[in-house]
Image (spheres, rainbow, N blue to C red):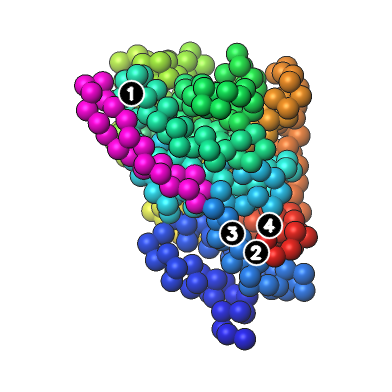
Amino acid sequence: MGERDNLTIDNLMKLLKERDPHQEEFHQAVQEVMQWVVPFAADSSRYNSFTLFEKLTEPERIIQFRVPWLTDKGEERCNRGFRIQFNSAIGPYKGGLRFHPTVNLSILKFLGFEQTFKNSLTGLPLGGGKGGSDFNPRGRSEAEIMRFCQSFMNELFRHIGPDTDIPAGDAGVGTREIGFLFGHYKRLTAQFNGVITGKSPAFGGSLLRPEATGFGLLYFTKHMMKQAGKEVDDARILISGSGNVAQYACMKAIETGAKVLTMSDSDGYIFVKDGLSREQLNTVMDIKNNRRGRIRECTEEFECDFHEGTPWEVEADIALPCATQNEIDKKAAKSLIGNDVVCVAEGANMPCTSDAVAAFHDAGVLFAPGKASNAGGVSVSGLEMTQNAQRLSWDKETVDQELHDIMDRIHDECVEYGREDKHVNYEKGAAIAGFIKVADAMLAQGAV
Ligand code: NDP
Ligand code: 2IT
C-alpha cells in the first residue's frame, strides 16, 4: 500500500496539488470541506476509502469550447466556454453559469465541487455542475449579450438536457441571459423543456426564483441567530454586492426590520447610516438591473456616502458577503471581530478565505458556509424543475413555504453533524451532512 492510499487530508491535498498545481481556489474549496469530512470518514469502516475521495474531487466530465461572437461594430471576438459536470451520484448535474473575466477551470471546479455538497444538502435529487465563460458582460450592449449567449449555446446544447444537466444563472447571468440561452436552445433542439432554470415565469420559470438565494440566506441567518439566543429583527447588517443575491437579501432584511447599512460593487460600497429604506433599495435595483450602472450613482439619488474598498470596517452585528469569492480575508475578518460582529453567513460562494473562517471560529463568531446558507437559489431551481415536469406553476406562497422548509432542514442537519461543546460548527455540519448522501449513492452505484 503506497502512502497515498492512506486516507488523510494531507495525502488528498498532495494528490490534488500535484495534479493541478495552479488551481488554488479549487484546492481551497476542497480543503475547507475535507478538513472535516476526511477525519469523519477515516474513522468509519464504510467511508474509509482513498478512492472514494479521489472520485469526489475529480469531475466526471469537463467540457471546454470556444465561443466566437461579433461586437456591434462587426469585430470578431473569441472567449472560452466551459461546463463542469462534477458529480451525478444523486441526480442530474445542476448548477449555474457564470460570465465574468475571472472565470477559469480553478474557479469553475471550486464552484462545481461546492455545488455537489450544496445540492446534496437541499435534500432534492440534484447532482453538481457549474459552467460559464471568461466573457465580460460589463459595458456590452443587449445585442452583444444576446449574440454571445447564442454562440455559447451553439456548443453547450449538445451536453445538457432536462434529465442530464440543467444550468441556471450565477454572477453575470440573470433572467435576461437565461431567456436568450433558453430561446436559442429551443431553436437548436426544437424542444421546449425544463433544461434551464431561472426562466421568466412567462415561459415556465418558478415564482420566487430571483428572490430565492437572498431570501433563503435571511431565513438561514434567522435560524443561526435563534440557535444562539439572538434576533435578526433590529440588527445592523453589512451586505456586499448589489447583484441578484445582495438585492434580495437586502429586501428580506428590511422586511424583517433589520438595518442594512451597506451594499457594494467592485468599485466600492455605499454606507447608509440609518439603514436602507425599501424605496432606496428600489433605486439600487433600478440602477443595477435596468440602467446597468454603478453603486456610486446612489449618491446622486439619495442620502448616502460612497467609499472605495470593501464594507467590512463598518460597525455592525451581522455580515452577509454576497459578491464574490475571497472578499473577506483575515484582515477584514479581524476588523469585523474587533467590531463585535456576531454572525457571518455567506451569500456568495466561498467569500471568506480559510484564514478568515478560522478567525471567526476562534473568536466564537457564528459562521455559515455558502453551501448551507445560499442553498435557497438552487433549491427553488429544483422546485422549478418539478413544476416543469408537472407542467404546472405553483403560487408564491407554495414556493416560499417549500423554501422555508428546505432552509429549516439544512439548518437542522448542520446542527446535527456540527454540534460542538458550546456552539454549532456550521462548516463541519454542512460538509459532513452533504458528504453522507453523495458518498452513500456513490458506494451503492459501484465502481463508476
Ligand atoms: P450578480 O452578477 O448579480 O452580482 C454580483 C455582484 O458582486 C455585483 O454587485 C458585482 O459588482 C459584485 N462583485 C463581483 N466581483 C466583485 C469583486 N471582485 N469585488 C467586489 N464586488 C464584486 O451575481 P449574483 O448575485 O448572482 O452572485 C453573487 C455571488 O452569489 C456569487 O458568488 C455567486 O456564485 C453566488 N450565488 C449566486 C446564486 C444565484 O442564484 N444567483 C445562488 C447561490 C450563490 P460589479 O458589478 O462591480 O461586478
Ligand atoms: O451557486 C449556486 O447555487 C447557483 N448559482 C444557483 C444554481 C442553480 O442551479 O440554481
Q: Is 176 placed above or below 335 here?
A: above
Frontmost of labels 1 and 3 is 1
Frontmost of labels 2 and 1 is 1
Residue 272 position in % (x across, y down): 41, 25
Which circle's residue, 4 or 1, is located before the other in the chain?
A: 1
Which circle's residue, 4 or 2, is located before the other in the chain?
A: 2
Question: Of the residues shown, which amino acid type is indicated by label 1?
Answer: Glu
Would you say residue 72 sits in the magenta stretch?
yes
The range drawn in magenta is: 62-84
Q: Can residue 339 be seen here?
A: no
The mark found on residue 37 in the picture is: 2
The mark found on residue 144 in the picture is: 1
Which circle's residue, 2 or 1, is located before the other in the chain?
A: 2
Neighbour class for label 2 at 10 Å: few (<14), some, many (≥20)? many
The mark found on residue 33 in the picture is: 3
CB within 8 Å, label 4 to label 2? yes
Taking the image in four quarters, ligand 1 sits in the one at: top left
Label 4 – label 1 distance at C-alpha = 41 Å
CB of residue at label 1: within 8 Å of ligand 1? no
Prevailing secondary structure of the magenta residues: strand
The mark found on residue 273 in the picture is: none
- Foreground of the two, 188 or 32: 188
Q: Quadrant of the N terminus?
A: bottom right
Label 2 – label 3 distance at C-alpha = 6 Å
Circle 3 SS class = helix
Question: Of the residues shown, which amino acid type is indicated by label 2?
Answer: Val
Residue sitting at 68 percent across and 72 percent down?
49
Question: Of the residues shown, which amino acid type is indicated by label 4?
Answer: Phe
Residue sitting at 37 percent across and 62 percent down?
22
